[in-house]
Image (tube, rainbow, N blue to C red):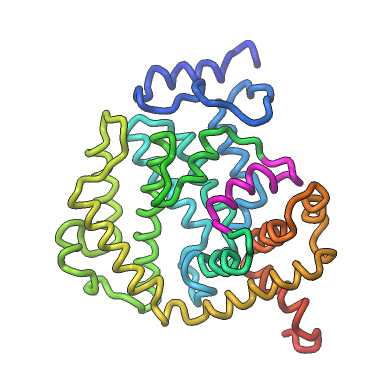
């Protein structure tokens, strides 16, 4: 099999097909720990596979996106959000002849460190932990340290850089990372509006006219408009940009969503309970470190700060597991069920 040079042929095809501004697999800055190359997969494809098979990726299916424990089968979770980000990013990358495998690896890994209960859980840990907490930094910590019992996934520099800098304020070093940064915003604006309509919080007619006239009045029109605008304005360029009118409309739409969805009392009425639960678990494990699981105790033995390790443990929990752990610790057994 090795004599067939499958990986080398794929790398050669990248050099022939991809844009000169793309990040080629052979140009990767490598991994923290040197390892033998796969004979059939270039480095970013290998990273994508490692993320897809990780425990932290599987846990995303039971983590909140926006709506806490919604009554309905079709609301997004952190996993479906991740898949939508990946699809948006791949569509843009393919049109621009960028490295789809790098884009997909970053997209699939960008929220691996997210807390249970969405951003409510993130705010709770950031407020109570003296070291602070940010989900993008935790995602990098997850792939560098927490996965595989403290070994990490040993991903390439480019994938970890894209994960770290995927937020609006970030500045990824590759065009592929910048594609994911835009794709994340496109995904959550699109599906959070869709879920808000499903939950009776908004109607399509609520979208302000000055936004609708530029990018349309429903989430389907928005996603199509955003992606086409990025492709047309970034094609054959060493940058990923939107036109000024569309970028301005996206900014106004994000503000509209923050005012009417992300801070809406109907959508967020239960968040205070989630914050209390997370903060209570944090205090409990800080005072009872012997109750942490074995892999967390190993991190303490390696010199990791207690508060950081407690954040590692709680942020890895799914919504259901966090609730079950809270009940196990604080609710008398006779009250369960």
Identity of the residue drawn at 51% across and 44% down: 163
Quadrant in the picture for the N terminus: top right
Residue nearer the viewer, 207 or 144: 144
Does 187 lie within the magenta span?
no
Q: Is residue 175 left or right of residue 79?
A: left
Span shown in magenta: 133-152
Residue nearer the viewer, 202 or 253: 253
User: Is 295 placed above or below 153 here?
Assistant: below
Q: Position of residue 277 (x, y in %)?
A: 64, 76
- Can residue 61 be seen here? no
Identity of the residue drawn at 61% across and 78% down: 276
Q: Position of residue 252 (x, y in %)?
A: 25, 62
The quarter of the picture where residue 233 lies is top left
User: Is 331 placed above or below 40 here?
Assistant: below
Q: Position of residue 140 (x, y in %)?
A: 59, 46
The quarter of the picture where residue 63 lies is bottom right
Q: Is residue 197 left or right of residue 211?
A: right
Q: Is residue 226 left or right of residue 16?
A: left
Quadrant in the picture for the C terminus: bottom right
Residue nearer the viewer, 314 or 332: 314
User: Is 60 placed above or below 10 here?
Assistant: below
Residue nearer the viewer, 150 or 207: 150
Identity of the residue drawn at 43% across and 22% down: 14
Q: How many marks?
A: 0
Identity of the residue drawn at 67% across and 63% down: 314
Q: Position of residue 151 (x, y in %)?
A: 73, 40
The quarter of the picture where residue 255 lies is bottom left
Does 140 lie within the magenta span?
yes
């Amino acid at each position: 099999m090795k004599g067939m040079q499958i990986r080398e042929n794929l790398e050669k095809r990248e050099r022939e097909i991809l844009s000169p501004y793309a990040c080629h697999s052979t140009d990767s800055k490598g991994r923290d720990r040197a390892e033998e190359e796969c004979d059939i997969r270039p480095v970013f494809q290998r990273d994508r596979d490692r993320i897809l098979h990780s425990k932290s990726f599987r846990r995303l299916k039971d983590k909140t996106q926006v709506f806490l424990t919604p009554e309905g089968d079709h609301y997004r979770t952190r996993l479906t959000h991740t898949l939508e980000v990946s699809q948006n990013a791949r569509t843009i990358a393919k049109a621009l002849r960028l490295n789809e495998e790098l884009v997909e690896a970053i997209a699939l890994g960008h929220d691996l460190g997210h807390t249970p209960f969405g951003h409510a859980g993130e705010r709770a840990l950031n407020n109570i932990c003296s070291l602070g907490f940010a989900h993008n930094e935790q995602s990098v910590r997850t792939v560098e340290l927490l996965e595989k019992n403290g070994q990490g996934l040993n991903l390439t520099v480019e994938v970890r850089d894209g994960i770290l800098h995927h937020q609006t304020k970030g500045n990824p070093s590759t065009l592929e990372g910048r594609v994911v940064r835009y794709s994340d915003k496109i995904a959550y604006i699109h599906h959070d509006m869709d879920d808000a309509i499903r939950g009776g919080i908004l109607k399509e007619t609520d979208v302000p006219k000055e936004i609708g006239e530029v990018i349309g009045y429903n989430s389907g029109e928005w996603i199509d408009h955003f992606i086409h605008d990025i492709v047309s304005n970034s094609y054959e360029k060493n940058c990923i940009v939107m036109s000024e009118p569309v970028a301005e409309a996206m900014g106004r739409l994000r503000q509209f969503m923050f005012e009417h969805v992300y801070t809406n009392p109907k959508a967020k009425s239960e968040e205070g309970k989630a914050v209390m639960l997370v903060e209570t678990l944090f205090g409990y494990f800080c005072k009872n470190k012997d109750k942490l699981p074995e892999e967390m105790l190993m991190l303490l033995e390696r010199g990791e700060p207690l508060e950081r390790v407690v954040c590692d443990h709680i942020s890895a929990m799914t919504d259901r597991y966090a609730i079950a752990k809270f009940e196990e610790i604080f609710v008398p057994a006779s009250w369960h069920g």
